Image (cartoon, grey):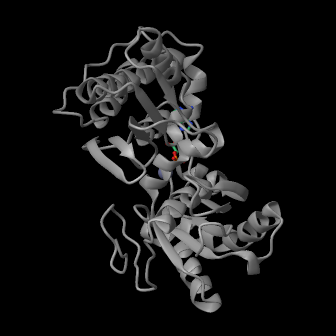
Amino acid sequence: MSSGKLTYLLALESSCDDTSVAVVRGRSRDDWPELAGWSVQSQDLVHERFGGVVPELASRAHLKNLIPCIEKALNDASIGWSEIDIVAATGQPGLVGSLLVGHTAAKTLSFLFEKPFISVNHIRGHLASVFIEARPAYPFVAAVVSGGHTSLYWVASAHEVSELGVTLDDAMGEAFDKGAKLLGLPFPGGAEIDRLSKAGDPRRYSFGRVSVPGLNFSFSGLKSELYRLCQREGESLSREDAAASYQRALVDHLLAKISSAVEEKSARRLALVGGVARNSLIRSRLDTLVNEGVIDEWFAPSPAFCTDNAVMIGFQAFQEFKAGRFSTLQSDVQSTSRPARGTRT
Ligand code: KG4
Ligand code: ZN
């Protein structure tokens, strides 16, 4: 493809419980593409009464939502299918049944219409999400904090990403969601805890300080502490104070590890991505790091691009296209982040 040709890329995301499709376009000489159109269909109402994502129901909802989402994204981009040059989909990590829906649909489109296919890593997609609306400079420390993943990365360039640490048990969003369930709040509970905490005293209930080696995380002990607090206090528990105290403990742990990573890498910039990046306490604590001169700046996508979306998958697929990394139709989905069979690197 000539570096001057405008390439249209269709990206599908179905790794967990949101079905999303995006069209991005760019020339191979561009650093990043631009967003042409996108759509997202949440499944919150499907899973709400179970208090968590039910994998079988998630796959079925993706099957129902995917084609309408593709139509909406193409309409939003004001283009027809024939203008698409490349098809991409999230291949890993995620719920296997959910991944299979988007990945298989993308491979089928690729086969039928003879368009190249690119299988994308979801975490790399989250890391690319900060470039959707801005052009932050490299290098930076990145915190991926979502319902399924919590890790720290050193991002030296678009193609040089190394993991610094990872959660050894629950993801931070999972800890928010399970904590919300203990407090009787609706699913997904992260935003509910954030909202309720504003009316609570974060020092009312004390939580232990988490101790875990290196730049790794552990959130499940704090969740158990909240469980014991709920048992102990019973009816006299203040939900607002419990939410605020629990949120503070989770955020203290995240910020302690972020600060250590920044110090270890002598970093001046930080990126915050993933659904939990919407959290207001984390955002104000990062502002404090800037005010204290610990970092020069931090950046995060706007809320719609923090949670799972196909735009970030399209942005990462554009990097793979620029590097000539296409996938074969033998490429398979993986529940964890490993090189997928059929992915040429
Ligand atoms: O990135 P995402 O859409 O899905 C995964 O890849 O897992 O993240 C969803 C997570 C949920 O756990 C949800 O509770 C959490 O993001 N979340 C929040 C907030 N908004 C969403 N957690 C804390 N505070 C928020 N304001
Ligand atoms: Zn995600």
Percent x, y for residue 274? Answer: 50, 43
Query: Split into 4 quadrants, where in the image is the C terminus?
Result: bottom left
Percent x, y for residue 220? Answer: 30, 37
Q: Nearer the viewer, residue 196 or 314?
A: 314
74 left or right of 189?
A: right
143 left or right of 83?
A: left
337 left or right of 148?
A: left
Q: Quadrant of residue 309?
A: bottom right
Q: Quadrant of residue 340?
A: bottom left
280 left or right of 231?
A: right
Q: Residue furthest left?
A: 213
Q: Nearer the viewer, residue 330 or 253?
A: 330
In this figure, what is the number of numbered marks?
0
Residue 126 drawn above or below residue 86: above
Residue 121 drawn above or below residue 64: above
Query: Split into 4 quadrants, where in the image is the N terminus?
Result: bottom right
Residue 233 drawn above or below residue 271: above
Q: Quadrant of residue 280?
A: top right
Q: Is residue 343 visible?
A: yes
Q: Is residue 184 visible?
A: no
Q: Nearer the viewer, residue 31 or 176?
A: 31
Percent x, y for residue 38? Answer: 71, 58
- For image coordinates 42% across by 19% down, the residue present is 248
- For image coordinates 36% across by 76% down, the residue present is 344
Q: Nearer the viewer, residue 271 or 148?
A: 271
- For image coordinates 26% across by 23% down, the residue present is 263
